[in-house]
Image: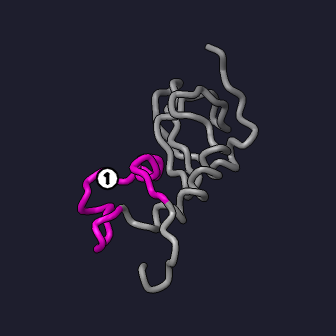
């Protein structure tokens, strides 16, 4: 990165957490020993995508009924939802639940 970057913007461990990366220093550090610069460049995309998505634990309406968000793939905008009747876990794209309604239960 030193050949094309003149100014190193701050990179934080929070960026690695937000991107669901392993916090193993050998996996998120560059050859220079600092956190990888790409974490900063990718962070804006993760933040924008995250703002569009519900939180883990939110109860939302899906085409198959109400369920709870148990995990997500932020970049692909895929939500893993646990439905209770019958008990099953299904994946939905954000577009499929874009008008989701939080269930106050």
Q: Residue furthest bottom?
A: 3
Does residue 74 belong to the magenta stretch? no
When the figure is inspected, residue 19 is found, relative to residue 37, above or below; the finding is above
Q: Is residue 33 magenta?
A: yes
- Tell me the residue at 26%/57% (across/down): 25
Give whichever of 11, 6 is nearer the camera: 6
Q: Quadrant of the C terminus?
A: top right
Q: Which residues are magenta?
A: 10-34
Q: Main secondary structure of the magenta part?
A: loop
Q: How is the image coloured?
A: one colour
Q: Residue furthest front?
A: 7
Q: Position of residue 14 (x, y in %)?
A: 44, 46
Q: Residue 83 at x, y = what percent?
A: 52, 30
**Image quadrant containing the N terminus:** bottom left
Q: Farthest residue in the right direction?
A: 99
Left or right, 80 with reference to 97: left
Residue in view at x 71 percent, y 34 percent: 100
Which residue is located at x 50 percent, y 27 percent? 86
Name the image quarter holding residue 61.
top right
Q: Residue furthest top?
A: 105
**Up/down of 14 relative to 64, above or below:** below
Residue 34 image offset from top left, x and y in percent? 33, 64
Above or below, 56 against 16 in this view is above
**Residue hosting label 1:** 22
Identify the element where label 1 is drawn: loop
Rendering coords of residue 64 (x, y %):
63, 35
Tell which of 93 and 40 is nearer to you. Answer: 40
Q: Residue at x 56, y 34 (%)?
A: 55
């Amino acid at each position: 990165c030193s050949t094309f970057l003149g100014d190193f913007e701050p990179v934080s461990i929070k960026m690695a957490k937000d991107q669901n990366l392993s916090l193993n220093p050998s996996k998120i550090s560059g050859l220079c020993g600092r956190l990888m610069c790409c974490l900063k460049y990718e962070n804006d995309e993760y933040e924008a995508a995250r703002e569009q998505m519900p939180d883990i634990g939110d109860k939302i309406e899906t085409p198959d009924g109400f369920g709870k968000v148990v995990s997500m793939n932020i970049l692909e905008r895929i939500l893993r939802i646990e439905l209770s009747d019958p008990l099953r876990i299904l994946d939905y794209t954000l577009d499929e639940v874009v008008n989701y309604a939080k269930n106050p239960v």
